[in-house]
Amino acid sequence: MSRTFPTRRFAAATAAAALAATGALTGCAASGSGDGTTEITFLTSNDAPNPETAEALAAAFEEEHPDVSVDVEIRPGGTEGDNLVKTRLSTGEMADVFYYNSGSLLQALNPDSTLVDLSDQEWVSSLTEEFTPVVSTDNGLYGAPLGASFAGGVVYNKPLYEELGLEVPETWDEFMANNATIAAEGDGVAPVIQTYGETWTSQLFVLGDFANVLAVDPEWADQYTAHQRSYADEPALLGFQHQQEVAEAGYFNEDFPSAAFQDGARMVAEGEGAHYPMLSSVIQTILQNTPDAVDDIGFFALPAEDAANTQATIWQPNALYVPRSTEGAELEAAKELVAFANSEAGCEIQNELLPPAGPYAGTCEALDTAPALLADIQAYFDAGKAANALEFSSPVKGPNLEKVTVEVGSGIKTAEEAAEFYDQDVENQARQLGLEGW
């Protein structure tokens, strides 16, 4: 889920971006000018607000470093963007600083061979213990965060909870009891919002449950990568089973087959629905479309069977990297730009243009005016009850998860049938990656 969910799902490779990317491929990565200015390039993706953020960082950096000029390049998102990044790295034509995923997709870039080790930079000491491993190998640390983390779980309407006298559930049974109360006393409010008009939104019951899986079986991710665990067995099967249970109880909004992501954001903001299993980054859509409701939105982790195992699943932010092809004065300027993004001035830009939907992973701090749900998410970190999403621990993810989770929610497949199908779905990808045991 980007990073690759939802970023990839939202990303549309525009013609302008494609042209820009093509042009970038044929240009020089960096150069010095005749007036002594060091010129560097900064590549980011085309999904908003990344271009605006890159331009703002570049402009502020140039003002602070008048001897450096930064040229911002835009690339497509999704698979096209991934391929472009890999091609430019392999041909030595990568921009001097580039914005890209952390976690498994970073590992696919072979960072030990292609990227500059930044482990000696001052900002490294500020990184969280959750972020550090997703930009590192045994041989170095390669990325600085840009943007905040976000959580996958349940966003909910707080005024409705207060009206019905509900408490935040810590177990699955408590969650279902809350749903029953909402269905009986909520005057038509949908207990659980689903939006299969955009299929990626259907995956949260499974992907958002991953921290709970780890709480039960801490070795699950490593053994899954080695083909020694599967979704057909507990504890991972429970995500599919919980989605089926909610669907069979009739707790979804009536238009769930056709409703879209923005419909879901509006419904939970306006109290037409009580719970929306979703990424906390939905708060950015609510900020844009229904700003008066932002502080009415809370967050809790998808509840496990046992309260002791209920944890928040976290998606770490993307990061800034420097390729090994950058050398000399350009390398020093590139490192300074990466550091600037995590300086006080850079953090001001991040807070303005990349409103946080979770805790920052480095030097930046959220403003007091940040959405209230950040405090709900921070509480899981403070309690030591947060864990990274599966994609940060394993490269194994099949392309059809959103297809089968739609089928489970729609009553087409049982949880067991869907889990078995998905286990088969990931096998091809695992073999393509050359993983042992598949």
Image: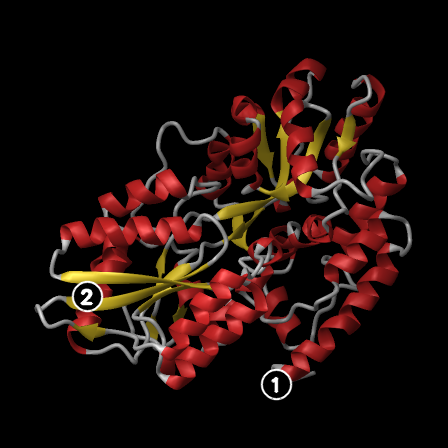
Q: In which quarter of the image is the N terminus?
A: bottom right
Tell me the quarter of the picture where residue 438 sits. Answer: bottom right
Q: Mark 1 points at which residue?
A: 434
Tell me the quarter of the picture where residue 262 sits. Answer: top right
Residue 406 position, x and y percent, is 80, 52
Select label 1 or label 2 by which is in front.
Answer: 2
Q: Is residue 189 above or below residue 169?
A: above
Residue 113 position, x and y percent, is 37, 83
**Secondary structure found at label 1:** loop
Q: Residue at the location (67% across, 42% down)? A: 261
**Secondary structure found at label 2:** helix
Tell me the quarter of the picture where residue 265 sits. Answer: top right
Residue 304 position, x and y percent, is 69, 44
Residue 409 seen anywhere in this rendered image of the structure: yes
Q: Name the residue under label 2.
A: 333
Q: Is residue 401 above or below residue 314?
A: below
Give the alpha-carbon distance from disc 1 to disc 2, as whole Å. Answer: 37 Å
Judge the density around disc 2: few (<14), some (14-19), many (≥20) Cα neighbours within 10 Å: many
**N-terminal of the two: label 1 or label 2?**
2
Q: Which amino acid does label 1 sit on?
A: Gly
Q: Residue at the location (47% across, 42% down)? A: 358
